[in-house]
Amino acid sequence: MLSAEKNERLTRVGPGTPMGELLRRYWWPIATHDMATRVPVKRRLLGEDLVLYRDGSGTVGLLAEQCPHRRAALWLGCTEDVGLRCGYHGWRFDADGRCLEQPGEPADSTFKDRVRATAYPVRELGGLVFAYLGPQTPEQPVPELPRYDLFVWDDAWRDIGHAELPCNFVQIMENSVDPYHVEWLHGRYGSFLRGESLPVVTKKHVKVAFEVFEHGILKRRVLEGHTEEDDDWKVGHPLVFPHMLRVGAAGLATFQIRVPIDDENTWHVWYQTYRPDGGAPPQPEVPVYEVPLKDERGEWLRDYVDGQDIVAWITQGRISDRSREHLGRSDLGVILLRKLYAQQMERVARGEDPLCTYRTPHDVIDLPMERDKFGSAVEFRQLWTRESSIRYSPIRSEVLRLFGDPVPSWS
């Protein structure tokens, strides 16, 4: 268990908090590519209210929500060829926060040169828009946006699912280093919901291990009937610090990205890539879709793996009360993750770069992940397209055809 004080330190993400200061050293997805348009949209990240837009030149900007003039919201505004104009009095700002125009002020006034909107760097990569809310000084310059492999492959198809979840992001991340829940939540409980006597997802875990490495935490396991020569142990897959899990196999790979909206809400992004042997043909556009959370009766969806995870996360409460938990040996991965967050908070407090900070340009960051998992490739893809968020993807039938797999009747 954690004390209430340590739980606060672990879960509060706003400006000035230890976790908030750590998380502001990283680039975060703030939107999917289709959200950045000529119409400004409201976004919230790490407890800060922001406005995202794309101006007539194609430049994407991210500004603090309130205009520095009279504090009206800048989403009440219009994009110009350059910048965003406040809808209240017409003040115009560029993507760096510079005030370009102040209608109503004298023509010879230099007032605009002394006014700035709060602006944050943004970058586009792989169909997502990333934002950086951390320091921007000569002593602490903006780090490089990590070019993780799934974001930059040029021979893969992609789709992006997303949903807003009413809970803190840490309890979602803890799930990523909790392998034992798979055989119970997705195995026994999933079978119980279906009225089936045998688990449909997984076998018993015989052995698990976790190690901190250059990208975060590497998770390994040996399942019943398997050995340490199998990919689940020999290769494993990573929790990419501080906010992603990479899972998949057989040419299908997913980033589960947990983006803290604030202390009590998380934007969850399922970023899928489909890369058959020999690569995929060009994809015209990355499809984006919302993952539903409830059925037509208003009940939480629990009839598939990701839905079961979501309900397990949110039923812990908006912020899990870790002072009332009782951890066992099966929770070693959770304990390790909490220690890693604490260590990295201390690094930031000392003025040092935390884990997974990149200061030099790079082409691609390759991450480890199993190739063979849960039996044959075809069986795995059938399972994953049925049991993950991909079940809601507009291209899931096309994905199976891409791999040359049979398309089930659900298509």
Image (cartoon, helix red, strand yellow):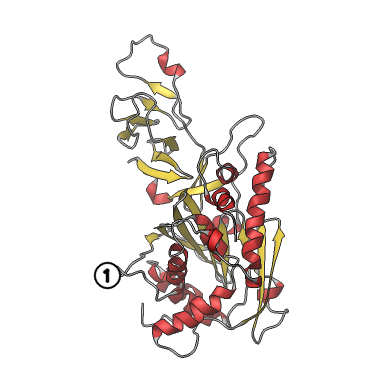
| Vertical placement of residue 228 versus 94, above or below | below
Q: Disc 1 on helix, strand or loop?
A: loop
Say what amino acid the circle numbered 1 marks.
Glu
Q: Quadrant location of residue 175?
A: bottom right
User: Farthest residue in the bottom direction?
Assistant: 197
Residue 258 at x, y = what percent?
50, 56
Q: Is residue 189 visible?
A: yes
Residue in front for this viewpoint, 363 or 186: 186
If the image is split into quadrants, where does the C terminus sit? Answer: bottom left
Q: Which residue is mark 1?
A: 296
User: Farthest residue in the top direction?
Assistant: 108
Determine crowd level at label 1: few under 14, some 14-19, many 20+ residues with C-alpha closer than 10 A. Answer: few
Residue at image position (48%, 72%) is 402
Residue in front for this viewpoint, 294 or 120: 294
If the image is split into quadrants, where does the N terminus sit? Answer: bottom right
Residue 198 at x, y = what percent?
49, 89
> Viewed as shown, does residue 215 lie left or right of 59?
right
| Vertical placement of residue 301 versus 169, above or below | below
Residue at image position (52%, 46%) is 13
> Viewed as shown, does residue 169 lie left or right of 211?
left
| Vertical placement of residue 282 versus 182, above or below | above
Residue 368 at x, y = what percent?
66, 64
Residue in front for this viewpoint, 246 or 126: 246
> Viewed as shown, does residue 158 lie left or right of 343?
left
Residue at image position (61%, 61%) is 239
Residue 116 at x, y = what percent?
45, 24
